[in-house]
Image (tube, coloured by chain):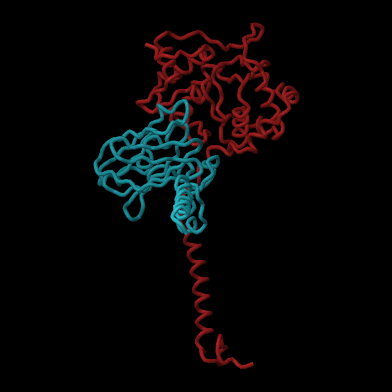
Amino acid sequence: MNWRKLRTFLLTVLVLCLIPATRYYQIDVPLVRFLQGSRHVDPLLLHLSGEFVENNLGTEQEPDGSVTVRMIAQQYLFIPHCILVPAGVPVHLRITSADAVHSLTFNGTDYAVKVLPGTISEAQLQFPRPGEYPTPCREFCGAGHYAMRSELKVVPRDQFPTLRPEERGNCAAR
Amino acid sequence: MQHARGFPDSGGRFPWRRGALISLTLILVAGTAGSALLLQARDNPPDRIPSYVAWTPETIAAASRGDAFRGMLLAKRCDHCHGAEGFSAEAYIPNLAGMDKLAILKQLEDFRSHKRLSRVMNPIAESLSTRDVSDVVAYYAKLPAFADPQDNRIFPQSRPDPAHAASASRLVSFGDGERGIPPCQACHGPVAYRPGVPSLETQNAVYVLNQLEAFASQARANDINMPMRTIAGLLTDDERHAIADYYGSGRGLEPASSTVPK
C-alpha cells in the first residue's frame, strides 16, 4: 500500500469518527442505555408521568448527603423558577426541555448545561460559596429568550435541612 | 443411559449440583419478589397532573378536524354567556371569537376532567362528546374579531391612566428580564404563539385579572409545566391589574411599540 492510499484511508476513518462526535448525544446504544438508564423522554408528555411531573421538580435530598435538582426548560422559563441548594455539596442536575433547545448558565460560575428536547441533560455541579446566582438561558430559544432567567440560591449547608420541604424544593413557592 | 459426565442426576459425579441449582433459583426468585415488594412499599407521593391534554399530533388533529357548521348549531347553548358573536356581555366571561382552536379545546378538556374548576363550565363540558368539542372549537376559531355596534359586547373597555398603561405596555412587549418575567406577547401573540395558548388581544379585563389572580393563588392549576402559575406569582398586584386593563381596553390590537415606554 503506497502512502496516498494510506492517507486516504486514515482521513476516511477520521471523518467517519468525527461525524458521530458532533452528534454524540443523539446516539442510542442499547447497552449504554441499559447501563446508564434511559435518558430519553417525550418532551410533549413530561407533565403526565415520569420524573418531571410538577410535584417532583426542584431539589431533592439524597440519602448520601448530595442533592438532585430536577428542572424543565420551556419557552421562556426554567421551572421551578428559583432553586435552592446547599453549599459545598454535590448537586446532580437533571434537566430536560419541553420545546426548543435551551442552555442553563449559572452566572458567576463556569457551569453551562445545554438542554435539548427529548433528552435528559445531566451535570454534576458543586457550589462552594452561598449566594444568589442568576441562571439565564444562553441559547436563543425564541421571542422571549432575553427574559428567560431564573435564580439559584445557594444556602449554607447547615441551614438547608432546617428548611421546610416545600421551601427546599422550590424557593419561588410562597 | 449412563451419566458418566456432564450434568448428572443425584447418582452421578456431582451429587450436590442439582440441590445447589434449585436453592440458587429459589434465592433468586425470593430476592426478585422481595425487592419488588420493597420498591412498591416506598411511599412516593402521587403525581400531580395539571392537565390530561398533551400536544401530540393526535390532539392537534382532533382539534383541526371539526365541522364549523355543526359547531355553530352546538354553540347556540354558549351564546347566552359568550355572546352570539363570541363577545360576551359580562366582563368576567371570556370572549371566544377568533380564539385559537387548541386553546378552547384544552380548556374544554380540562373542564371535562375537572382539572379546571368552574361550577358552570364543568357540567357543560361533560355533556359534550369529543366530536362536539372539535366542532365548537372550529366554530369559535372562525368567528371574526372586528367591532360590531349592533352587538351588546362590552369589549373595548375604557382606557386606563397613562402611567398604568406604560407599565403594562412594558411587560407585554418586553417583560422584565431582571425578575425573569418573559413578555406576554412572546406566547400570547401577536409576536409568537405556543400551542394551546390563547391570544389575549380581544379579552375582557376582568376575566384576564381573575385568571391571573387564580394562577397566582394556585386556585387554577391547569397550565402544563406551570408557566402561568410561575409568572402570575412573580407579578405584583398592580402589574396584574395593569396587564388586565391593557388587554381589556383593546390596546393589544394596536401595533406594538418598538421602544420601551417612558
Q: State left or right for residue B94 relative to residue A87.
A: right
**Quarter in which the C terminus of chain B is drawn:** top left
Q: Colour of chain A?
A: cyan
Q: Residue at x 63, y 30 (%)?
A: B105
Q: In the displayed structure, would residue A34 be above or below residue B157?
A: below
Pinpoint residue B150: horizontal percent, then vertical percent: 66, 7
Pinpoint residue B112: horizontal percent, then vertical percent: 63, 35
Q: In the displayed structure, would residue A169 be above or below residue B231?
A: below
From the viewer's side, name the closer residue of B85 and B251: B251
Which of the 4 image quadrants contains residue B8? bottom right
Tell me, by letter, which chain the rendering colours red. Answer: B
Hey, which residue is sitting farthest front in the picture? A2
Q: In the displayed structure, would residue A168 be above or below residue B117?
A: below
Q: Residue at x 42, y 8 (%)?
A: B162
Q: State left or right for residue B29 relative to residue A65.
A: right
Pinpoint residue B170: horizontal percent, then vertical percent: 41, 17
Q: In the displayed structure, would residue A121 be above or below residue B193?
A: below
Q: Residue at x 43, y 12 (%)?
A: B165
From the viewer's side, name the closer residue of B29 and B174: B174
Pinpoint residue A104: horizontal percent, then vertical percent: 39, 37
